[in-house]
Amino acid sequence: MPAIILTLPLPPTANHLFANVKGYGRTKTAAYKRWIHEAGWELAIQRAEHIAGWYDLAVYLPADTNGDSDNRIKALSDLLGKHGVISDDSYAWSVRVYRTHSIAKGCRVELRAVPEDERAAA
């Protein structure tokens, strides 16, 4: 299976996904809800295929992205699982995050299935 390449809006950092609301508990922030909605539509438009089982994930962020680059992974992985692009984020064989000048906004996500023989050789 060839790599799945997606262009998605830049996800919020893990620090901005949830908030504690008095009397209610932990809930998704408005920014996270907006991103889930927008990114979900982008996935639908791009018609991403499904990877069953183990996968490699590479995320490319704009070079000028603020904050910890690895804080963007959780939101992306959860979205990919919710929309059936991956079976479950626990099947991530490897995860890499890059900053690049070739992306002005949003992010590029590349997924690749990892065959059993490749996992056995690792």
Image (tube, grey):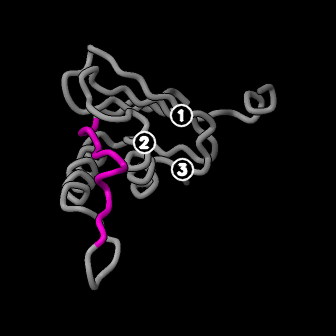
Give the extent of the magenta segment: 8-20
Dot 1 corresponds to which residue?
95
Using the image, determine if residue 107 lies above or below residue 21: above
Single out the residue that lies furthest toward the front.
22
Q: Residue at x 37, y 49 (%)?
A: 14
Does label 3 or label 1 sit earlier along the sequence?
3
Looking at the rendered structure, the kind of residue marked 3 is: Asp
Between 45 and 42, the one lying in front of the other is 42
Looking at the rendered structure, the kind of residue marked 1 is: Val
Residue 52 is one of the magenta-drawn residues: no
Estimate how packed mark 1 is, as few (under 14), some (14 to 19) or many (20 or more) residues with alpha carbons within 10 Å.
Answer: few
Between 87 and 30, the one lying in front of the other is 30
Separation of residues labelled 2 and 1 (CA atoms)? 8 Å
Separation of residues labelled 2 and 3 (CA atoms)? 10 Å
Does label 2 or label 1 sit earlier along the sequence?
2
Q: Residue 121: x and y, percent? A: 80, 26
Q: Residue 74: x and y, percent? A: 43, 48
In the image, taking residue 117 as reference, residue 100 lies left or right, namely left
Q: Residue 17: x and y, percent? A: 31, 56
Single out the residue that lies furthest toward the right.
120
Estimate how packed mark 3 is, as few (under 14), some (14 to 19) or many (20 or more) residues with alpha carbons within 10 Å.
Answer: some
Separation of residues labelled 3 and 1 (CA atoms)? 10 Å
Q: Which mark is residue 79?
A: none
Q: Residue at x 51, y 27 (%)?
A: 2
Dot 2 corresponds to which residue?
73
Looking at the rendered structure, the kind of residue marked 2 is: Ile
Question: The residue tagged with tag 3: helix, strand or loop?
Answer: helix
Say whether marks 2 and 1 touch (CB < 8 Å): yes
Q: Residue at x 55, y 54 (%)?
A: 88
Between 64 and 121, the one lying in front of the other is 64
Q: Quadrant of residue 21?
A: bottom left
Dot 3 corresponds to which residue?
89
